[in-house]
Image: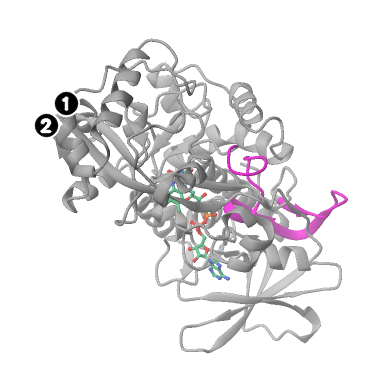
């Protein structure tokens, strides 16, 4: 992980735009660079293009999309931006927040129209967790795996060169921070040095780097990391070594909905539809709909560090087509009871406490409960079901500071010559800590900043490409 003086380089080949990382950001950047008239090269260390993008639920937020318009949802960039600022108490990175609020919608439309990667408006995600409008979108398969296979197919159709099993270990750069190329290590230990006119860092965050987590997010150093193995903060280390600024490094996406011990994330739709989370004592401990990310740390603080998502047959039916939920049912992860007593027995919580919790939820229907949650869905009614979940760190949200062209900038705001960053490699829109994360913000940053970085890197590489 070093910067090698460029004058020592002997490149075996040279490309216009090199892209490190083949997740949603890297593949979107490649499509944008291709549209802008250059032939990008994507270098992915793993055997396949997956990343945290593949592990995700595949839901992204975007405002003012054609899909929203068709569904009759009134939304726009300013409303989205206001939601980002409200969620983060005004602490979101101003450049990233404005870029994502204003550009995510057109990037979603461009992917559909130009590359047949269609993100449908997802009716299941009603306004919650800080989104004041229904602005979550997903591809037809409703999973990150489905989204990634569509992006990979689009790259195939566009003739993008993607090399897997290609770990970028070092960059070649001049003293002023201009990147001239990179070194790639192959699984057999051999190395290749490749020159590039512009570089896009799409290698995500530092969730899989315990030292960086301990330094930047000490509260989560004991937390389970449930993101892509291999996202070790390479982008941040290279970017900083080249003079780029790192910002909001304490920000992260947690989740209190990781099915235990199955390692499958439970779709928050179970909660949006009226489900609740209880602890081992049978009691609720928070408003389940106010902080999708901060709920991770809350669950970790409960006795035993776990929680049960309790829901009923109506919610089961509403969620039955979600792929992650189907996978959990296939694994027999669900506990059920025909009566409250039977469920209490099945999940080993005190029956009286569970009864009282359900009575309190019923009493809150149509109003707000003691945690401030508004219950507008029908009352939970037996038969009841439950899934055991734990909290985890999913994804880091801090990263390289960028300008409106997704170019990496120094502390003083001056841009590096030809270095771009997007997705988890760049700063996100979550402010500080856990609670600023809005559902869908990670993938939104991946495709939006990826598209901008790909276009601008192509332009920087000298082909006179138009901006997206
Ligand atoms: C379980 C889970 C569920 C999630 N659900 C959602 C969701 O529904 N909606 C949402 O918006 N966000 C979600 N997120 C967050 C979201 O997945 C990320 O924000 C997003 O995938 C980041 O995209 P990316 O392209 O930047 O990174 P990634 O998809 O992680 O891609 C980075 C790629 O870079 C490669 N790489 C790293 N270093 C190198 C190197 N040195 N050389 C070569 N390759 C390298 C990695 O192998 C990886 O494939 C979820 C995250 C997790 C873990």
| Residue at left offset 35%, top offset 19% | 360
Q: Which residue is mark 2?
A: 338
**Residue 382, disc:** 1
Quick one: 344 or 445, which is closer to the camera?
A: 344
Q: Is residue 136 magenta?
A: no
Asked if labels 1 and 2 touch by Cβ distance under 8 angstroms, the answer is yes
- Mark 2 surroundings: few (<14), some (14-19) or many (≥20) residues within 10 A: few
The total of numbered circles placed on residues is 2
- Mark 1 surroundings: few (<14), some (14-19) or many (≥20) residues within 10 A: some
Task: Tell me where residue 215 appears, x and y as whole percent.
Answer: 69, 61
Task: Tell me where residue 366 appears, x and y as whole percent.
Answer: 37, 10
- Model colouring: one colour
Label 1 near ligand 1 (CB < 8 Å): no
Name which quarter of the figure residue 209 lies in: bottom right
Task: Tell me where residue 390 appears, x and y as whole percent.
Answer: 39, 49
| Residue at left offset 40%, top offset 67% | 48
Magenta stretch: give its range: 407-435
The CA distance from mark 2 to mark 1 is 6 Å
Q: Is residue 447 above or below residue 4?
A: above
Q: Is residue 321 visible?
A: no
Task: Describe residue 322's horizontal placement relative to residue 105 as left or right.
Answer: left
Q: Which element carries disc 1, helix, strand or loop?
A: loop
For the N terminus, the image quarter is bottom right
Label 2 near ligand 1 (CB < 8 Å): no
Q: Which element carries disc 2, helix, strand or loop?
A: loop
For the C terminus, the image quarter is top right
Is tag 2's residue or tag 1's residue first in the polypeptide sequence? 2
């Amino acid at each position: 992980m070093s910067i090698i003086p460029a004058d020592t380089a002997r490149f075996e080949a040279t490309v216009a735009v090199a892209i490190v990382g083949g997740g949603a950001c890297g593949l979107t950047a490649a499509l944008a660079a291709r549209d802008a008239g250059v032939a990008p090269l994507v270098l992915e260390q793993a055997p396949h293009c997956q990343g945290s993008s593949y592990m995700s639920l595949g839901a992204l937020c975007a405002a003012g999309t054609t899909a929203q318009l068709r569904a009759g949802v009134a939304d726009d960039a300013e409303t989205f931006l206001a939601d980002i600022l409200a969620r983060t108490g005004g602490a979101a990175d101003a450049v990233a927040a404005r870029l994502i609020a204003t550009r995510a919608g057109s990037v979603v439309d461009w992917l559909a129209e130009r590359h047949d990667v269609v993100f449908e408006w997802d009716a299941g995600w009603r306004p919650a967790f800080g989104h004041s409008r229904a602005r979550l979108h997903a591809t037809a398969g409703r999973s990150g795996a489905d989204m990634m296979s569509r992006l990979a197919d689009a790259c195939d159709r566009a003739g993008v060169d993607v090399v897997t099993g290609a770990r970028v270990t070092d960059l070649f750069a001049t003293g002023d921070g201009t990147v001239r190329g990179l070194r790639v290590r192959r699984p057999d230990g051999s190395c290749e040095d490749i020159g590039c006119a512009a570089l896009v860092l799409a290698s995500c965050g530092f969730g899989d780097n315990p030292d960086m987590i301990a330094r930047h997010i000490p509260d989560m150093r004991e937390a389970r990391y449930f993101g892509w193995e291999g996202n070790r903060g390479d982008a941040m280390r290279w970017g900083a070594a080249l003079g780029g600024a790192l910002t909001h490094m304490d920000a992260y996406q947690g989740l209190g909905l990781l099915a235990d011990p199955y390692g499958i994330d439970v779709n928050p739709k179970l909660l949006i539809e009226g489900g609740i989370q209880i602890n081992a004592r049978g009691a609720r401990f928070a408003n389940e709909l106010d902080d999708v990310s901060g709920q991770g740390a809350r669950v970790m603080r409960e006795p035993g560090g776990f929680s049960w998502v309790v829901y009923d047959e109506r919610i089961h039916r509403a969620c039955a087509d979600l792929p992650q939920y189907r996978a959990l049912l296939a694994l027999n992860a669900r506990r059920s009871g025909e009566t409250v007593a039977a469920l209490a027995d099945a999940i080993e919580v005190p029956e009286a406490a569970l009864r009282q919790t359900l009575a309190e939820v019923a009493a809150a229907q149509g109003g707000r409960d003691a945690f401030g949650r508004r219950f507008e869905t029908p009352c939970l009614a037996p038969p009841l079901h439950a899934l055991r979940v734990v909290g985890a760190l999913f994804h880091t949200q801090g990263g390289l500071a960028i300008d409106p062209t997704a170019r990496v900038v120094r502390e003083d705001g001056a841009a590096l010559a030809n270095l771009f960053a997007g997705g988890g490699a760049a700063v996100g829109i979550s402010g500080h800590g856990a609670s600023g994360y809005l559902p869908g913000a990670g993938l939104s940053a991946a495709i939006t900043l990826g598209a901008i970085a790909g276009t601008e890197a192509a332009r920087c590489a000298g082909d006179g490409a138009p901006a997206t």
